[in-house]
Image (spheres, rainbow, N blue to C red):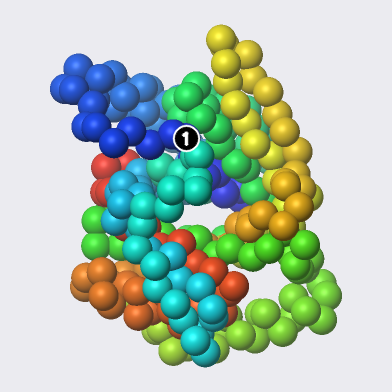
Amino acid sequence: MHYFALLLGPESTEQPDAATQADIMAAYQNFHAAAGASIRAGDALTPSATAVRISGGPAAPTVTDGPFAESAEVAGGYYVFEAENLDEALDLARQIPACASGGVEVWPIVEWNQPEKSLEGDHWLALLLEPADEAVPPGTPEWDACTVAHGEFGTAAGDRVKGGAALHPPSTATTVRVRDGKATYTDGPYVEGAEVASGFYLLSAADRDEAVKVASMIPASAVELRQLAGVSGL
């Protein structure tokens, strides 16, 4: 099975010094060396100040520039793991350095469409968001209707879609945090009324304006668009 891991944490407004940056890079290199056989995709995301939120759906999209002050934690990166089961995926997630200061949300993937090659800075993560109480499980008529809508988006977007996945409902998600070397696990669903991830796309675009144009076509209540930093080495 495949699992989507979204890295969350507080975002500093100041650039870390060279020594701190080196320590962070070393920690992730060690993680990649240990977990590389299970990593199918991943990257850091550029700062939330460069993010875009698109709401209202394709019929009447409203574009809001980041950062989004109401968020105590913001997404700083993502991975896609291949694992035998959720326990194995959670064991991988707890090793991610982001767990020490923030947390990692782990979601079972319904179907993973893997990019043909590694993606760098001219690519974007479009995280699809829905109200938690409107999550649609696979195998329902509502899911089938969403599948048709996303198929139409894929046709319209063409080769600008490089990969992506639908996620199982929030009741299947788990947040992992590590404090003082001890891992804690919090099961979904999350706070009532809050938005939760329902899927994601990896998009190719010549620039930010084109990325926003493509993401505005996605059939979702809201889309958070973040550019890939191109530092994963995957």
Q: Report which quarter residue 168 is drawn in.
A: bottom right
Query: Percent position (x, y) of residue 86?
Result: 71, 39
What residue is shown at x 29% (from left), y 56% (from top)? 50
What residue is shown at x 61% (from left), y 85% (from top)? 149
- Relative to the observer, which residue lies in front, 68 or 44? 68
What residue is shown at x 38% (from left), y 36% (from top)? 11
Query: Percent position (x, y) of residue 202?
Result: 42, 64
Q: Report which quarter residue 109 is drawn in.
A: bottom right
Label 1 sits on a secondary structure element that is strand
Q: Residue furthest left?
A: 18
What residue is shown at x 31% (from left), y 52% (from top)? 49
Q: Which residue is mark 1?
A: 9
Residue 150 vertical position relative to residue 34 in the rendered view, above or below: below
Query: Percent position (x, y) of residue 98?
Result: 46, 30
Identified by mark 1, the residue type is Gly
Q: Quadrant of the C terminus?
A: top left
Query: Percent position (x, y) of residue 233?
Result: 29, 41
